[in-house]
Image (cartoon, rainbow, N blue to C red):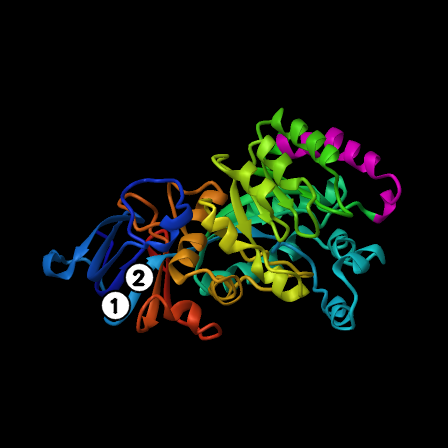
Amino acid sequence: MDLIIKNIKTLVQIDESHRPYVAGKEMANLNTLPDAWLAITGGKISSYGSMSECPETDSPVLDASGKLLMPAFCDSHTHLVYAGSREIEYIDKIRGLSYEEIAKRGGGINNSARLLRNSTEEDLFEQAMKRINEIISKGTGAVEIKSGYGLETGAELKMLRVIRKIKESSPITVKSTFLGAHSVPLEYKGRQSEYVDLLISDMLPKVADEGLADYVDVFCDRGFFTVDETDRILEAAAKYGITPKIHANELDYSGGIQVGVKHGARSVDHLEFTGEDEIEVLRDSGTMPTLLPGAAFFLGMDWAPARKIIDSGLPLALASDYNPGSSPSGDMKFIMSLACITMRMLPEEAIHATTINSAYAMGVENELGTITIGKKANLILTKEITGLEFLPYAYTTNLIDKVILNGKII
């Protein structure tokens, strides 16, 4: 036994059922244990129970009196490898320009692409590790990171190699996603199909050859990539055994959800425009609907219909969308607060959506996301608080006392 945590006020998100995710009305039910202990052995959860049955041990002891212990957050959608920042566009947004208008002027994603192409792998890694350490301090224990600010073969590979180095260098669990189809680069303006050809014939084979991506993503939405183009890209990725994750329906009813489900996407993300047809397609699909309220908040967009999705019996995940243009924050506790305040999710639902369901959305549900014997000990110990409802309620207060990754206190 490496560590035993005693006198836990409440042990949150206990689940020995090994279900891959939680859906519909079950999201309102959260299994907890008051006055508990938990033991960690070999970096994994080895046992837990009521303090009345706590074993005697010579192992190191961490006292958790008045505190909650829960799984670390899993952030299944980020773009945190990028160069510089885009606060000037933030001022443009304040003055009334839309996300699409900024992109058409050569800003947005293409602005980040210009900065990234002129940055070295070492510089990108150094910048990204500051963000990684930031999100760890805020309770995130697993993160999916996308490319997509290169928009040319060399720069996309550069981003993915930086993500691989993060995997090798940080205690956080990392999944990598190839998002060459994030936007059409300025040099291909008016020649979008040619850029898709380049992505399929040059980028994808090189990404696959180096084993750089766990997933492939496409921004399938109005003004970006069409359903037919998305189809072509995902069919090509399937030949290399790379599973999709899709940006879908952020700006309109784009068909992105449907094409994602068609290709067995692990998740479809954003979903501000989700109606009955989209909900029906998602039903029993195995594709996780994932909402990114940080982007809607920052861009002043409509909120995704979280209540409608959950009340329809579907599962739901939440992620930060940490990126320089539309969601410059990786604070998952704040994402929980946004979900509760603006989308009327219950605290229990928000915890499921940021732990087990978001673990599923990035393919790590068998090792993370719940308090389960044998799972990796990636945990959050809160400060002394009244209960789990206080986490989203106190939306700017730092309530994280300690973060434990791979069984070690960070």
Q: Mark 2: which secondary structure? A: strand
Position of the C terminus by quadrant: bottom left
Q: Residues within 10 Å of mark 1 (few under 14, many from 20)?
A: many
Is 196 in the magenta?
yes
Residue shown at 37% from the left, 53% from the top: 378
Label of residue 5 in the image: none
Q: Is residue 66 shown left or right of residue 57?
A: right
CA–CA distance between discs 1 and 2? 8 Å
Front in this rendered view, residue 204 or 71: 71
> How far from the left and from the top, in percent, is residue 104?
83, 55
> How far from the left and from the top, in percent, is residue 144?
54, 48
Q: Residues within 10 Å of mark 2 (few under 14, many from 20)?
A: many
Segment tinted magenta in the rendering: 186-208
Q: Taking 185 as reference, is 382 above or below it?
A: below
The answer to whether mark 1 and mark 2 are in CB contact below 8 A is yes
> How far from the left and from the top, in percent, is residue 128?
59, 57
| Residue highlighted by disc 2 | 69
Amino acid, disc 2:
Leu
| Residue highlighted by disc 1 | 64
Q: Is residue 42 shown left or right of residue 290?
A: left
Most frequent secondary structure within the magenta stretch = helix
Q: Residue furthest right?
A: 190
Q: Quadrant of residue 238?
A: top right
Q: Is residue 154 shown left or right of residue 294?
A: right
